[in-house]
C-alpha cells in the first residue's frame, strides 16, 4: 500500500500513460527551456517578422520576428510556474482553513463557510479580475488572484472530508488515549483527507493554466517581454489573417496541456477509487 | 455478588448524571432537546463486571462516553477513584486516561486504515509522551499482541488485512497498552459472528483475571450480559429501570421482565409465548413526567403516568424504579 | 409434500464460487431455518431461490431448483417475475429496500393485491386493512394513510410482512427479518410471523444467524458453513444431537441462562475467506476432531441416524 501504487496504476492505463507522457514533455520544456529552445525568447528580428513555419522556425515567428517555438517553450515555464505555485498555495491554505473549520466547528466554521459560500457563487475568473483590479497586474498578482479564486474549492473539500472523518471510531479511540487536537488533526485526519484534495488540486492546475492564459490574454498577467501563452494568443489576434500560426500554436499548447492534466487526473481518480469522495462536496 | 460492597470499593461512582442533546435550532427549525441520559446514578465496584443492557436509544452508549468524559455531562458527576472527572484539567485528564480505556463496538473503524498494527499499538505511548527505543517498542508490541492471542507476524499488517475478530483483538490490545485499571466495553462483540463473539468474551474474561481489571460492559444482549456480568443495570429511554445484584436474580421491573421474555433460548424445548407489549416507544424528544415505560406497561397505573418512580433498594443491592413491581 | 426442492446448486460470481452443492427442501406449511455466520452464503441462497442472482452478476452453474413441480433454473425472467411476489414473497432485512419512501403505506400494500390477485381498489383496501390489523398494528386506518418515514423500524417491518402476505404466496423467504430490530420488537415480530404462516399453512424459509430465533420458530434447520451445507435435520435433533461438529460448536457459543462463567470458549480461528478456502472439509482448521482425511477429502452430505450431515466422523 505505498503512495505510488495508484500513480503506477494510473500510468498503466492507456489514457493515463499517454497523458503522463505529454505532461513529462511539458514539464521538461519548462525546466530546461534555455537548453531546448533553439532561440532566445526576447530577441527581436523585425525583417523576418510573421515568417511562416518552416525549417528555420518550425512554428514560424511572431510580429516582432521572435521564434514562436522558443517562446512557447519558455511560455510553458510561465504557465506552469504560475499555475502550480498558485494552486499549491491555494491547496495549503484550503487544507488549513478546511481542517480548522471542519474540526473545531463553531463560529470559526460559520465564518469560513459564509466566506467560502460567497466566493463559491462567483466564477473564478470574476474573482481573479476583481483581485487584480485591486492589487494591479503582473505575474505575482496573477498567482495571488488564482490562488484566492480556487481557495473556496479546496476549503470546502477539506472541510467535508474532515467532518466525515472526525466521527470515525479511531478518532474517538485516539482521543481516549489522551491525544490532543494537534495529534488528531495531523496524524489522523489530514493524512486520511489528503488524497482527494491533492487530486482536486491537480485537476484545478489545468483550470488555472486556462485562467492564467485568460488573464494574460487581457494583458493582466505576465508583462512583456516575458512569454505567456495567453498573451501570445492575444498579440496573435491582430495578425490572425496574416499569420494565423501566432495564435494557433499557443492555443494548441494550452489545449494539449490542459487535456493531458484532466486525463491524467481522471486516470488517477479511477486508480484511487475516490470518485465519490470528490463528489461529496 | 456480596451485599457488603460499600462506596469505598467502587472504582467509579456516577451521581445524577444527565446529558442532553439538541437538534434543530437553525433557520426556521424549532430547537428540540432530548435527554439521552436522564438522571442516572450507579456505581461500578472494583474488580467486578457491571453490565448495562438496553435497547437502541436507551442511552447506554452515551453513558459509556460520559463515564470516560469523551462527552461532557449536562448535569451530575462521575467520580473515578476519588477524582471528579469534570473538575480535572486537560493535563490531568490526559494522565487519568492511562487508567480508563474503552473497547469500541465497530472494530472495522477503530483503527486508522493508514496505520499498521504495530504503529497503532505504539500510538498510546506516543500520545502519552513516552518515547520508546526501537528495541523497547518491539518488546512492548510483541507483548501486547501475544496477550490478546495474536501472532507478532501480524505487526506489519494493515487493518483491512485482518478479520473482524482479529481487529477487535487489536482494539483490546490498544486499550490495554497503558495498563489501565478500568475498561468500558461498548458492545465489543455486536458486529462479530457468534463463534467469534464467544472467543472475545473468553479473552476478556482471561484478561480481567490476569490484570485485575474492572469492566463496564455495555450490550443489548441480555443473555450475554447475564453470563458475563456480576451485576446488571437495565436502562430504558435514558433511565435506569432496575439494577440486578447478580446474574441469576429474577427481574421485578416489568420492562426488565419483558426484555428477558423476549430473549429466545437456544433450546427448542423451551419455546416462549411472547406477551405483546402495547403502545409505542415514546419519542426521545418527548418529556415524560412519569415512568418511561408506562406507555407500554400492562401494570401501569395513573401514578405511573404522573410521577417518576425513584430508584429504590429492595435489599441486597437489588434496585428498582417501579411503582408496582412484579412479585 | 415438498413445495421447494433445491438440488446440488452451485453458484459462481466471476471467478469465485460462493455456493457449492447446496441441497435442501421445504414442505408445504413448514418453517425451515437457514443458519450460518457471515460468509456462509445464506443470503445468496435466498437470492438464488428468488431468481435474483443475475442482478449481482451471479449464475447457477449446476443443480436444479424445483418449485411446486416446476424447474426454476433456466426459466425466463418474465416468468420468474410472475412467480416473485405472487407465489414466492421476499422479506428483507432492511424494510426500506421494500418500501417506497414517497408512497403512502396503504397504497403500497393495496398495490400487491391489485397486481397479483386482480382485486378492485376498494377490495384491496379492505384486504390491506385486515392484514395490517392481523399484524397487531394499532389503528390500521391511520397507518394505511401514513408514509414509511412516520413509522418505527418494527412497524415498517410489519408492513413489509403484510405486503408479503397480501398476494397469498405459497412460500415466504425471510432474510434476517428481525436482525436490525430491538429484541422486544424482534420477539413480537417472530411470534406474529410464525402464527400467520402457521394459520395459513404457508412455507417459510427463515434465514438467520441467531440460534435463539431458530430454536423458537423453525421445524427443520439447514446449517451452512463457508458456502456448503454442513448439516440438515429436524429442530429437536439439531439442538439435542448435532451431527456436525460446527453445529455443535455454534450452539455452544451462545450463553445459556445459568451457564457457568468461563465456560464460553468460542470456535478458534475465523470463517475462511472465499478466496482462501481450505482443502477437504472447510471447517477442518477450526475443528477439534479433524483428521488427515478431513484435510484431504471433501465430506459428502450423507444420511446419518437422522438428518443429513457432511462430516467424515460423525456417527452413522
Image (cartoon, rainbow, N blue to C red):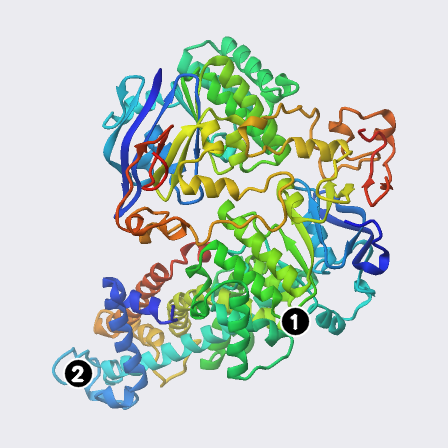
Quadrant housing residue C115: top left
Would residue C96 appear left or right of A221 to someone viewing this image?
Answer: right
Can you give x and y, in whole percent of width and height, for residue C259 in the image? Answer: 62, 42
> Compared with residue A191, is residue B183 higher up or lower down, i.e. above or below?
above
Q: Relative to the observer, which residue lies in front, B96 or A281?
A: B96
Q: Residue at x 48, y 27 (%)?
A: C236
Q: Residue furthest front?
A: C315
Is the C terminus of chain B in the top left, top right, bottom left or bottom right quadrant? top right
Please tell me whether residue B90 is drawn above or below residue C45 in the rendered image: below
Q: Which x, y percent locates residue A75?
A: 32, 80
Between disc 2 and disc 1, the foreground one is 1
* B161 in relation to B26, above or below: below
Q: Which residue is mark 1?
A: A180
On the question of residue B102 being in view, the answer is: yes
* Residue that numbered label 2 is attached to: A57
C150 or A250: nearer the eye?
Answer: C150
Amino acid at each position: 500500500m505505498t503512495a505510488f501504487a495508484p500513480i503506477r496504476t494510473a500510468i498503466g492505463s492507456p489514457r493515463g500513460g499517454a497523458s503522463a507522457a505529454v505532461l513529462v514533455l511539458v514539464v521538461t520544456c519548462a525546466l530546461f527551456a534555455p537548453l531546448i529552445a533553439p532561440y532566445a525568447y526576447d530577441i527581436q528580428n523585425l525583417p523576418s517578422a510573421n515568417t511562416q513555419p518552416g525549417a528555420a522556425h518550425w512554428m514560424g515567428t511572431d510580429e516582432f520576428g521572435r521564434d514562436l517555438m522558443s517562446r512557447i517553450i519558455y511560455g510553458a515555464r510561465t504557465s506552469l510556474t504560475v499555475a502550480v505555485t498558485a494552486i499549491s498555495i491555494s491547496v495549503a491554505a484550503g487544507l488549513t482553513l478546511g481542517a480548522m473549520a471542519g474540526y473545531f466547528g463553531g463560529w470559526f466554521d460559520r465564518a469560513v463557510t459564509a466566506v467560502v459560500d460567497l466566493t463559491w457563487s462567483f466564477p473564478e475568473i470574476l474573482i481573479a479580475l476583481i483581485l487584480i483590479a485591486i492589487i494591479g497586474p503582473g505575474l505575482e498578482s496573477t498567482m495571488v488572484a488564482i490562488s484566492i479564486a480556487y481557495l473556496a474549492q479546496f476549503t470546502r473539500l477539506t472541510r467535508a472530508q474532515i467532518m466525515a472523518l472526525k466521527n470515525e471510531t479511531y478518532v474517538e479511540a485516539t482521543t481516549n488515549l489522551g491525544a490532543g487536537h494537534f495529534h488528531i488533526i495531523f496524524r489522523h485526519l489530514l493524512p486520511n483527507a489528503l488524497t482527494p484534495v491533492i487530486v482536486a488540486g491537480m485537476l484545478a492546475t489545468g483550470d488555472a493554466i486556462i485562467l492564467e492564459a485568460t488573464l494574460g490574454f487581457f494583458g493582466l498577467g505576465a508583462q512583456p517581454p516575458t512569454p505567456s501563452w495567453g498573451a501570445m494568443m492575444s498579440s496573435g489576434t491582430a495578425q490572425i489573417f496574416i499569420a494565423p500560426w501566432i495564435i494557433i500554436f499557443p492555443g494548441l499548447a494550452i489545449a494539449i496541456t490542459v487535456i493531458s492534466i484532466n486525463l491524467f487526473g481522471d486516470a488517477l481518480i479511477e486508480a484511487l477509487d475516490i470518485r465519490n469522495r470528490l463528489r461529496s462536496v | 455478588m456480596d451485599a457488603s460492597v460499600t462506596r469505598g470499593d467502587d472504582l467509579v461512582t456516577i451521581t445524577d448524571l444527565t446529558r442532553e442533546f439538541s437538534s434543530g435550532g437553525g433557520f426556521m427549525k424549532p430547537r428540540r432537546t432530548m435527554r439521552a441520559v436522564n438522571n442516572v446514578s450507579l456505581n461500578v465496584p472494583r474488580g467486578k463486571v457491571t453490565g448495562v443492557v438496553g435497547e437502541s436509544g436507551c442511552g447506554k452508549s452515551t453513558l459509556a462516553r460520559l463515564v470516560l468524559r469523551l462527552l461532557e455531562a449536562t448535569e451530575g458527576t462521575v467520580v473515578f477513584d476519588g477524582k471528579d472527572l469534570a473538575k480535572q484539567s486537560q493535563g490531568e485528564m490526559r494522565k487519568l486516561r492511562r487508567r480508563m480505556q474503552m473497547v469500541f463496538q465497530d472494530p472495522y473503524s477503530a483503527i486508522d486504515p493508514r496505520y499498521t498494527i504495530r504503529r497503532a499499538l505504539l500510538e498510546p505511548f506516543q500520545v502519552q509522551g513516552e518515547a520508546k527505543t526501537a528495541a523497547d517498542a518491539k518488546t512492548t508490541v510483541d507483548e501486547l499482541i501475544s496477550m490478546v492471542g495474536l501472532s507478532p507476524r501480524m505487526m506489519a499488517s494493515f487493518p483491512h488485512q485482518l478479520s473482524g475478530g482479529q481487529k477487535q483483538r487489536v482494539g483490546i490490545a490498544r486499550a490495554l497498552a497503558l495498563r489501565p485499571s478500568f475498561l468500558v466495553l461498548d458492545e465489543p462483540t455486536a458486529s462479530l459472528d457468534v463463534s467469534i463473539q464467544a472467543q472475545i468474551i473468553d479473552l476478556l474474561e482471561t484478561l480481567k483475571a490476569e490484570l485485575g481489571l474492572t469492566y463496564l460492559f455495555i450490550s443489548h444482549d441480555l443473555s450475554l450480559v447475564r453470563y458475563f456480568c456480576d451485576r446488571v443495570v437495565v436502562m430504558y429511554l435514558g433511565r435506569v429501570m432496575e439494577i440486578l445484584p447478580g446474574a441469576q436474580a429474577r427481574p421485578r421491573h416489568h420492562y426488565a421482565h419483558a426484555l428477558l421474555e423476549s430473549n429466545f433460548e437456544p433450546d427448542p424445548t423451551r419455546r416462549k409465548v411472547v406477551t405483546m407489549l402495547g403502545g409505542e416507544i415514546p419519542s426521545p424528544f418527548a418529556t415524560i413526567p412519569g415512568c418511561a415505560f408506562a406507555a407500554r406497561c400492562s401494570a401501569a397505573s395513573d401514578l405511573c403516568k404522573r410521577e417518576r418512580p425513584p430508584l429504590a433498594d429492595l435489599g441486597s443491592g437489588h434496585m428498582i424504579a417501579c411503582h408496582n413491581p412484579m412479585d | 409434500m415438498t413445495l421447494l426442492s433445491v438440488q446440488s446448486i452451485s453458484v459462481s460470481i466471476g471467478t469465485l464460487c460462493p455456493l457449492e452443492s447446496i441441497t435442501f427442501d421445504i414442505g408445504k406449511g413448514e418453517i425451515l431455518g437457514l443458519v450460518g455466520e457471515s460468509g456462509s452464503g445464506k443470503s445468496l441462497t435466498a437470492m438464488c431461490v428468488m431468481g435474483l442472482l443475475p442482478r449481482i452478476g451471479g449464475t447457477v452453474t449446476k443443480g436444479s431448483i424445483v418449485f411446486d413441480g416446476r424447474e426454476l433454473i433456466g426459466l425466463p425472467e418474465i416468468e420468474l417475475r410472475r412467480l416473485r411476489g405472487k407465489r414466492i414473497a421476499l422479506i428483507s432485512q432492511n424494510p426500506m429496500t421494500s418500501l417506497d419512501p414517497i408512497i403512502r403505506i396503504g397504497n403500497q400494500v393495496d398495490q400487491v393485491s391489485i397486481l397479483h390477485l386482480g382485486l378492485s381498489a376498494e377490495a384491496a383496501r379492505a384486504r390491506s386493512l385486515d392484514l395490517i390489523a392481523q399484524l397487531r398494528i394499532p389503528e390500521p386506518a391511520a397507518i394505511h394513510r401514513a408514509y414509511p418515514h412516520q413509522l418505527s423500524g418494527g412497524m415498517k417491518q410489519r408492513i413489509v410482512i403484510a405486503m408479503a402476505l397480501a398476494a397469498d404466496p405459497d412460500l415466504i423467504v425471510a432474510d434476517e427479518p428481525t436482525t436490525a430490530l430491538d429484541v422486544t420488537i424482534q420477539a413480537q415480530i417472530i411470534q406474529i410471523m410464525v402464527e400467520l404462516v402457521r394459520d395459513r399453512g404457508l412455507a417459510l424459509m427463515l434465514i438467520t444467524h441467531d440460534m435463539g430465533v431458530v430454536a423458537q420458530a423453525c421445524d427443520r434447520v439447514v446449517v451452512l458453513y463457508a458456502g456448503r451445507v454442513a448439516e440438515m435435520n429436524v429442530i429437536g435433533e439439531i439442538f439435542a444431537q448435532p451431527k456436525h461438529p460446527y453445529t455443535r460448536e455454534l450452539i455452544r457459543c451462545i450463553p445459556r441462562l445459568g451457564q457457568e462463567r468461563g465456560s464460553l470458549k468460542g470456535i478458534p480461528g475465523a470463517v475462511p475467506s472465499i478466496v482462501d478456502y481450505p482443502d477437504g472439509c472447510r471447517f477442518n482448521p477450526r475443528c477439534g476432531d479433524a483428521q488427515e482425511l478431513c484435510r484431504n477429502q471433501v465430506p459428502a452430505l450423507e444420511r446419518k441416524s437422522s438428518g443429513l450431515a457432511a462430516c467424515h466422523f460423525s456417527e452413522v
